[in-house]
Amino acid sequence: MVAFNTLRHWPADRELERRVASELSAADPIRFRHVNVSARSGVVVLLGTVATYYAKSLGFQRAQRIPGVASVVDALRVDAGPVTATALVDA
């Protein structure tokens, strides 16, 4: 589940966090389950871990398209996990 920061004091920031988190969760709840969203004055920060660079890019693009987002800070880390022999054969 995509989390959003509930500690902000401004209702507009909380609403923006909720909308971005909902968009990411709707796009792919599994892919973005380790992503936290925070916002302040239209600047959205995506923080957490995703499995691929595609997911990192997708999260950034989805956040950018939300009305009210002035800019996105992409602090997502890509961690694909351990590479196995099966994964290499399937690739």
Image (spheres, helix red, strand yellow):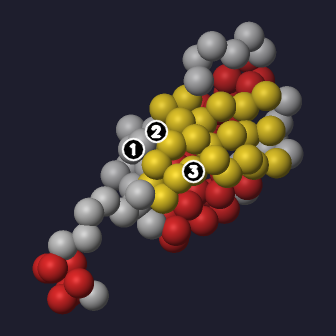
Name the element at disc 1.
loop
- Residue at position x 59%, y 24% in the image: 5
Q: Position of residue 14 (x, y in %)?
A: 67, 23
User: Does 66 appear above or below 19?
Assistant: below
Q: Is residue 30 left or right of residue 70?
A: left
In the rendered structure, which amino acid carries the disc numbered 1? Arg
Q: Nearer the viewer, mark 3 or mark 1?
A: 3
- Verify CB contact (< 8 Å) between mark 2 and mark 1: yes
Q: Position of residue 18 (x, y in %)?
A: 59, 32
Name the element at disc 3.
strand
Q: Which mark is residue 76?
A: 3
In the rendered structure, which amino acid carries the disc numbered 2? Val
First reached walking from the N terminus: tag 3 or tag 1? 1
Spatial CA span between label 3 and label 1: 12 Å
In the rendered structure, which amino acid carries the disc numbered 3? Leu
- Residue annotated with mark 1: 33
